[in-house]
Image: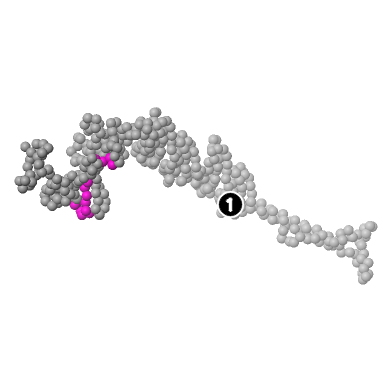
Amino acid sequence: MANSLIIPPYRAALLTNADGSPVVRNGANGDGDPIATERQWYMFWQEMAKQVNDGSGLLAGLAGIVDYGSHAERPDPQFITDGALYVEWDRGSVLYQNQGGIWQYIAGTMYGTLAPDQRPTDLGPAADVGFQFRTSTDPARAFAWSGTAWIETTPIRYGTHAERLAATIANLVSGMLWMETDRGSVIYQNQGGTWLFLTGTMWGTLVPDQRPTDLGVHDAGFDFRSTAPPPREFIWNQTAWVEVTNISGATGLTHANVVTKVGAAGQIVEGGITDESAANSDNVHVNAAGDVGIGNPGTAPFPGGGFKHLTVGAIASALQPAINLATSTTGAIGHTINFANYGLASSDKRFAMILCTTPGTAQTGDFSVYTWNAGVFGQRLFISADGKVGIGNGNPLSRLSVVGLPTSAAGLASGDVWRDAAAGNVLKIVP
């Protein structure tokens, strides 16, 4: 109220005498005037009436600022105070404001169902932008009016793979996540109008093959694992399934490009290694006999005889095969090939060794052959970097140095070489 609160007159019970005559003050001054209380009451009621009237005026003015009703009852804004607010009680109490003769959506959320679809169909291109609608039933979903269409703003949705593809992605907010309930709850994200696989694993069988056949570039990384033994795992690489199964404990594994067949104990029975290209698959192959082929499928490169073999290079190719023992150092280092028999009882299972050493100089190195004789290790052949050959001599000074030749033919066989010291160290050959 505009005025301060007024207080009723004091001595309200002394207005009149019992006969109705005014009470005369008998004070010391003896003026005999009636008490002025009745005039004070008149002024009180007059002021009270004024304040009531003022309050009514304020309430009447407020009625033109804030109003409520149904959407259909919302008045023409041309005849409403500019800035006035209107609450639509039949649409979740959403709030509109009269802005220059146009009802503009301000705030509020309408709740309803999607079946039947209770989202308003009469929203406009500008004044209703941002109108919020949420479902009142599970699953909870949220929508916002863009001015032309409903945009779903639900942060996370779930449904089948087919339902995700059927959804108009242009009407879904960028960044939305979708969990595919029929594919192990794998998660996709709407990234700028494209569904991209994020994470998750689908579980299924390989007989019948339940791996999805409709994956593409944007599904890279999709993970599939088998539910039946042996456990197997596959990753989609944008164009094909690549098996990434850890072979430990697995059995009977096969793949179009990666062939890995192992026994129940986890040992490789037969397998192939690929560079994930069908044209270059099976670059390394191990057959059931344990033979290894590098650069060939291992179907027929190995000779018989019960031996284990390593074949390098395709037998039907003109390419030159090579085995490289490589390192990366500037100091002296040796490259070794050992020959061993692990059936021996000795602590050192080797019986022969080839050693090539380099002093650290570019393209410089020597070659040695070592053997064990009754447990005694020794260098038998040496070829220096400049081509000097030593037999029984690890430091030949001439093109050929032979140390340890017998000095008689006794006990030698035809073709053996011996040194005749009596004839001046003449080399002779046993006929």
Q: Position of residue 430 (x, y in %)?
A: 7, 38
Query: What residue is shown at x 89% (from left), y 64% (from top)?
Result: 35
The amino acid sitting under disc 1 is: Asn
Give the residues drawn in magenta, as a range: 348-364
Query: What residue is shown at x 31% (from left), y 34% (from top)?
Result: 271
Quadrant location of residue 413? Answer: top left
Q: Position of residue 174 (x, y in %)?
A: 46, 46
Q: Depth check: 226 or 83 in front?
A: 226
Query: What residue is shown at x 24% (from left), y 47% (from top)?
Result: 335
- Which corner quadrant holds the N terminus? bottom right
Label 1 environment density (alpha carbons within 10 Å; few <14, some 14–19, many ≥20): many
Q: Position of residue 201 (x, y in %)?
A: 43, 38
Residue sitting farthest toward the right: 19
Residue at which label 1 appears: 98
Q: Would you say 234 lies left or right of 107 here?
A: left
Determine whether the residue tagged by mark 1 lies in a helix, strand or loop: strand
